[in-house]
Amino acid sequence: MVVIVIVVGAAIIRDGRLLAAQRAEPARLAGGWELPGGKVDPGESDEDALVRECHEELGVKIRLTGRIGGDWPLADLGSVLRVWTARIVEGEPAALEHLALRWLGEAELYDVDWLPGDLPVVDALREHLR
Ligand SMILES: Nc1nc2c([nH]c(=O)n2[C@H]2C[C@H](O)[C@@H](COP(=O)(O)OP(=O)(O)OP(=O)(O)O)O2)c(=O)[nH]1
């Protein structure tokens, strides 16, 4: 049986800047930058998982505003990343589970070491920061 692991990521945008988060673990990914999010739990919708993960990781309530592409392939065989644009409706993001957070404008978008699977997503997000 092939099990596809679905990972959801939030492209949280405020004032033309994208919120990037630096992974703390596991060791092979630590230091890399990603979109806040995580794995969808069994029986959970993608959207609910993303709202839950952002609350756990950042301490904020988000509202999803759109979808970026479809299934973005990740390096781990059988994993895909699904991405939504989002805005914060409550709270101020804090790095509760990450090493650091950064708000990146279009000119700074590639200043951080994105996880490899995120690079095409970041390309697609560029136009949303203008
Ligand atoms: N959240 C997130 N994960 C990403 C991105 N890009 C990317 O390759 N990944 C990978 C890293 C991890 O291998 C996997 C997500 O796992 P995770 O550890 O964040 O999931 P989780 O919060 O549900 O945690 P757990 O079940 O492992 O405890 O997807 C991204 O932009 N956001």
Image: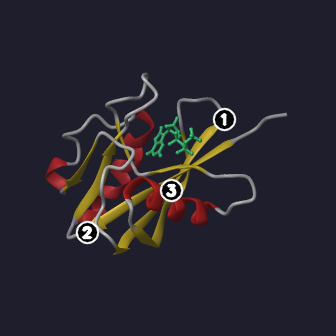
Residue under numbered circle 1? 78
Picture coordinates of residue 10, whole percent (x, y): 43, 58
C-alpha span from label 2 to label 1: 32 Å
**Numbered tag placed on residue 111 in the rendering:** none
Mark 1 falls on what kind of element?
loop
Mark 2 residue type? Arg
Residue under numbered circle 3? 53
Q: Residue at x 22, y 42 (%)?
A: 110
* Up/down of 29 relative to 65, above or below: above
Picture coordinates of residue 38, whole percent (x, y): 53, 48
Q: How many marks?
A: 3
Q: Earlier in the sequence, mark 2 or mark 1?
A: 2
Q: Is mark 1 within 8 Å of ligand 1?
A: no
Q: Are marks 2 and 1 in contact (CB under 8 Å)?
A: no
Badge 1 crowding class, 10 Å Cα cut-off, few under 14, some 14 to 19, many 20 or more, is few
Picture coordinates of residue 129, whole percent (x, y): 25, 64
Q: Is mark 3 within 8 Å of ligand 1?
A: yes
**Numbered tag placed on residue 14 in the rendering:** 2
Mark 3 falls on what kind of element?
helix
